[in-house]
Amino acid sequence: MGKTSVERLQYRTTVIGLIHLYNPMARNALDYRMLNSLEQILQNLAYNLSAAAVVITGSGNKAFSVGMADFGEKTGFPLPSLRAHLQRIIQQVKTFPIPTVAAINGYALDEGLELALACTCRISSEEAIISMLPRTEKPYEHLDQDSFSQDFDVITKDWGPIPKLITATEAVKLHLVDQIVPPTMLEEVALQWACQLGQRLTSPVMSDHDA
């Protein structure tokens, strides 16, 4: 079964929480144990505010997460229950008090992609593969609709209801990913983004009296 781990890294002058989704035998599929530990880790980070930003990634270089697959049936937890649990976590990530960065290393499919999309921004390996449904099937309301909608409608106009695999380059055109980098640079660039976002959030705002 899967699990989630976190380490607090001192990146330059900023503390970053680095979260790993760990289910290597199933390409980091999201199961009951992983969702429980992820929710607890996020709660602890939000409560303690011991980091300025968070990076979420998958263990290894093959997958961020392939979603839930059929883990619900195999482990005795029905998929509707698991998906409801995931939706709570997605809402938790969307409203997180500090910035979150998804470092997409390999496959990000279905619910795995949903988790990545909930983050403040997404950095992708050049080798990443993403699976998504047309907006009529699974909307992405939280993305920048002005830029997202036009490209999405053009690229997906001939799609059916079956999920489609797209490359990292296509994901950038769809504004699903903010930057693509070589696999060896993924964690470093994700930490750079997290550091910059975290510093921006914690930097004091200069008032007119300070000028």
Image (cartoon, rainbow, N blue to C red):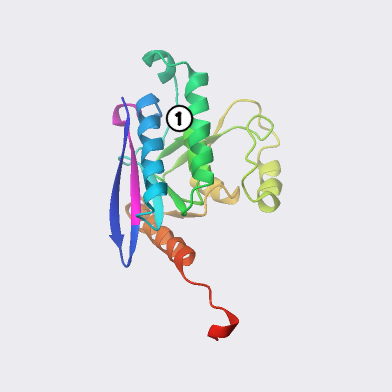
Say whether residue 17 is magenta: yes
Q: Foreground: 147 or 197?
A: 197
Residue labelled with disc 1? 67
Tell whether 79 sits left or right of 146: left
Which amino acid, by three-letter code, is at mark 1? Gly
Is 76 placed above or below 182 here?
Answer: above
Is 199 placed above or below 134 here?
Answer: below
Is any atom of residue 73 visible in this view? yes
For label 1, the crowd category at 10 Å Cα-Cα, with few meaning under 14, some 14 to 19 and many 20 or more, is many
Is any atom of residue 113 visible in this view? no
**Residue at screen point 37% across, 53% down:** 186
Secondary structure beneath label 1: loop
Q: Which region is colored magenta?
A: 16-26
How far from the left and from the top, in percent, is residue 33?
A: 35, 27
Is 134 placed above or below 50 here?
Answer: above
- Which residue is at the far bottom? 211
Quarter occupied by residue 188: bottom left
Say whether residue 85 is magenta: no
Placement of the C terminus among the 4 image quadrants: bottom right
How far from the left and from the top, in percent, is residue 84?
A: 52, 26
Tell whether 28 sits left or right of 162: left
How far from the left and from the top, in percent, is residue 198?
A: 43, 61
